Image (spheres, rainbow, N blue to C red):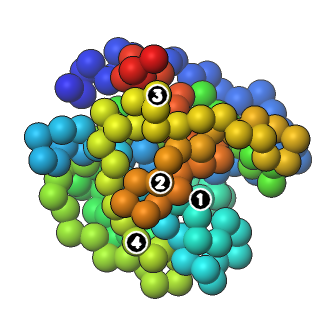
Amino acid sequence: MDAWVQQHLPVVGVSTRTAQDLRRAAVLIPLLQADGQWNLLFTRRTDTVLDHKGQVSFPGGAREAFDLSDEETALREAQEEIGLDPACVKVLGKLEPFETISRYEVIPIVARLDWPVRLTLSPQEVNRVFTIPVGWLGDCKNWTEVAYNHHQVIQYERYDGELLWGITASITHQFLRKMDWMGC
């Protein structure tokens, strides 16, 4: 599976933007096998975090000066937010960057998790960790495009009470398209 995913990921070059244009960030797209199917792991942020309160997201955050790479940023943030041991993660590649309305350039890092793993959630940052099957995410009846803030954004139907929308839904969508896992 790892080699197959890596073959489908794009070759992403170095960004030509300067630091004054956009702040760099990275998120981990955790791919895991559970109950006989492939899933993506998501978090729901607490209502006390500074940005994106209560929203579904991938583990990740802003790149710090001491981070040597986008992969290192995503792994560090995943360890801080959900206690994910980097030794249980195999980085497979990355997707093209996403720009956010909050002036971030977000680099999605695709990785496979050795599942199950022990997770310890940061009570300041994360309320919940959950998985959604890739087959459900790729099913066209489970998502739509909606208008938000003068833009079209992807929004999924609720899954296990959780609403996946916005940049996290867009990153999910791009990943599924690259893997040819969209059912439409």
Kindly report which numbered mark, 4 or 3, lies closer to the viewer in this rendering. 3
Q: Which mark is residue 128?
A: 4
Q: Measuring 21% from the left and 69% from the top, which residue is drawn there?
A: 118
Which of 173 and 146 lies nearest the eye of the viewer? 146
Residue to which mark 2 is pinned: 158
The quarter of the image holding the C terminus is top left
Check disc 3 and report its element: helix, strand or loop: helix
In this picture, residue 167 sits left or right of residue 101: left
Check disc 2 and report its element: helix, strand or loop: loop
Give the distance between the C-alpha atoms of the residues marked 2 and 1, in whole angstroms: 24 Å
Of the image marks 2 and 1, the number of the one nearer the N terminus: 1
Of the image marks 4 and 3, the number of the one nearer the N terminus: 4
Query: Percent x, y for residue 83?
Result: 34, 70
Of the image marks 4 and 2, the number of the one nearer the N terminus: 4
Which of 21 and 180 lies nearest the eye of the viewer? 180
Residue to which mark 3 is pinned: 140
Residue to which mark 1 is pinned: 61
Which of 4 and 21 lies nearest the eye of the viewer? 4
- 10 Å crowding of disc 4: few (<14), some (14-19), many (20+): some
Q: Measuring 45% from the left and 48% from the top, which residue is drawn there?
A: 28
Give the distance between the C-alpha atoms of the residues marked 2 and 3, in whole angstroms: 14 Å
- Toward which corner of the image does residue 80 lie, by quadrant? bottom left
Of the image marks 2 and 3, the number of the one nearer the N terminus: 3
* Residue situated furthest front in the rendering: 141
Q: Amino acid at mark 2?
A: Arg
Q: Amino acid at mark 3?
A: Cys
Query: Percent x, y for residue 111?
Result: 35, 41
